[in-house]
Amino acid sequence: MQFQLSGQQIEVTQALREHATAKLDRLTRLDDKLISLAIVLSVDKLRQRAEGTLGVIGATLHAEATEVDMYTSIDMLFDKLVNQLRKHREKVSDKHQHEAREARLYG
């Protein structure tokens, strides 16, 4: 999986990079077929924003989190991405189960 971490009007420190890569483990545990993850960190006055775009097979998931602390916004971003990935996987698995059930009944 490709992982890109960049910053707008903020320098991405080694501590921020390590924090983001530590959280990346949560996504890879859910799905090992992830294509890419691009995270952009930005600062607007007192708001610390983290935006993430996750590429998976069949979809592109996007989430954004704005908090007072950058570490908290990264945590919130990964929470949102995990929820979206779970929801996407349930849709894909439900669709395949429905097709298999119809094949058994009518096939």
Image: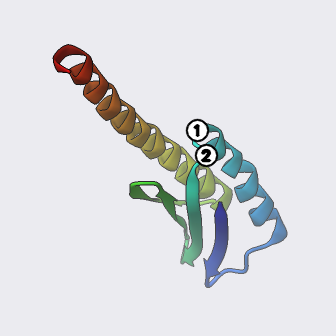
Farthest residue, direction right:
14
The residue lying toward the viewer, choosing from 18 and 88, is 88
Label disc, if present, on residue 16 of the rendered structure: none
| Quadrant where the image shows the N terminus | bottom right
Residue 79 to residue 1: above or below: above
Whether residue 52 sits left or right of residue 105 in the image: it is right
Callout 2: helix, strand or loop?
A: helix
Report the colour scheme. rainbow
Residue 62 to residue 13: above or below: above
| Quadrant where the image shows the C terminus | top left
Q: Looking at the image, do the residues carrying marks 1 and 2 touch, with CB atoms under 8 Å apart?
A: yes
- At horizontal 30% and vertical 34% (from top left) the residue drawn is 95
Residue bearing the label numbered 1: 30
- Determine the image quadrant of residue 61: bottom left
Farthest residue, direction front:
107
How many angstroms separate mark 1 from mark 2 (CA)? Answer: 5 Å
- At horizontal 57% and vertical 75% (from top left) the residue drawn is 42
Name the amino acid, label 2.
Leu
Whether residue 18 sits left or right of residue 80 in the image: it is right
Farthest residue, direction top:
105
Classify 10 Å Cα crowding around label 1: few (below 14), some (14-19), many (20 and above): few
The residue lying toward the viewer, choosing from 4 and 55, is 55
Estimate the x, y position of residue 75 in percent, counting from the top left. Answer: 61, 50
Whether residue 101 sits left or right of residue 14 in the image: it is left
Label disc, if present, on residue 27 of the rendered structure: 2
- At horizontal 62% and vertical 45% (from top left) the residue drawn is 32
Name the amino acid, label 1.
Leu
The residue lying toward the viewer, choosing from 53 and 47, is 53
Estimate the x, y position of residue 31 in percent, counting from the top left. Answer: 57, 42
Classify 10 Å Cα crowding around label 2: few (below 14), some (14-19), many (20 and above): some
